[in-house]
Image (tube, rainbow, N blue to C red):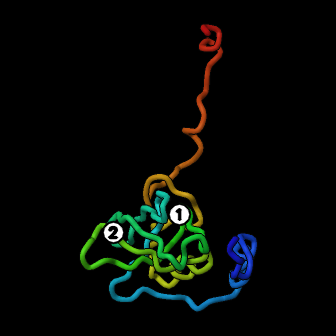
Amino acid sequence: MPKNKGKGGKNRKRGKNEADDEKRELVFKEDGQEYAQVLRMLGNGRCEAMCIDGTKRLCHIRGKMHKKVWIAAGDIILVGLRDYQDDKADVILKYMPDEARLLKAYGELPDNTRLNEGIGGGLDEEDDGDAADYIDFEDEDIDKI
């Protein structure tokens, strides 16, 4: 039997999330980077995101963030664009909700970007109300059934 040379197992790796609550400096985009909003998670460390420039890209979550930073639909992320593939990008950073609000306040994100919501279709879909969520039946319709 091989001798264990590590410092612990699965539970030790799970308990290393102490740096979450710290305030970090807000990171702005540079050349070759773009802000994006996650449309849906695809699995295998990939997601589909709508970039602020209007392009839908397949994004790969980098290894440093994989299984450590959880990304969900509707999150604002910073992606690194690829020189050789315009339809693909790499996730560099996930913004916390308060950081995303600050980016919107600074004018980095457009006003039609919806924050803190899981989205299904796009960035600028408007939901006018709950009118389409239920159907009204009249008494005559029920009597026919």
Residue in the picture at 69% in, 87% down: 22
Q: In the image, residue 59 lies at what x, y percent?
A: 41, 68
Residue sticking out furthest to the top? 144
Q: Which mark is residue 3?
A: none
What's the CA distance linking mark 1 and mark 2? 18 Å
For the residue pair 45 and 109, the one nearer the viewer reads as: 45
Residue type marked 1: Gly
> Against 116, is 132 above or below?
above
For the residue pair 25 and 133, the one nearer the viewer reads as: 25
For the residue pair 95 and 141, the one nearer the viewer reads as: 95
Q: In the image, residue 71 lies at what x, y percent?
A: 56, 67
- Which image quadrant for residue 53? bottom left
Please state if 51 lies on the left or on the right of 13 as rendered.
left
Please state if 57 lies on the left or on the right of 121 as rendered.
left
Q: Which mark is residue 74?
A: 1
Please state if 93 lies on the left or on the right of 88 as rendered.
right
Q: In the image, residue 135 lies at what x, y percent?
A: 59, 29
Q: Which mark is residue 88?
A: 2
Residue in the picture at 33% in, 67% down: 54
Q: In the image, residue 137 lies at what x, y percent?
A: 61, 22
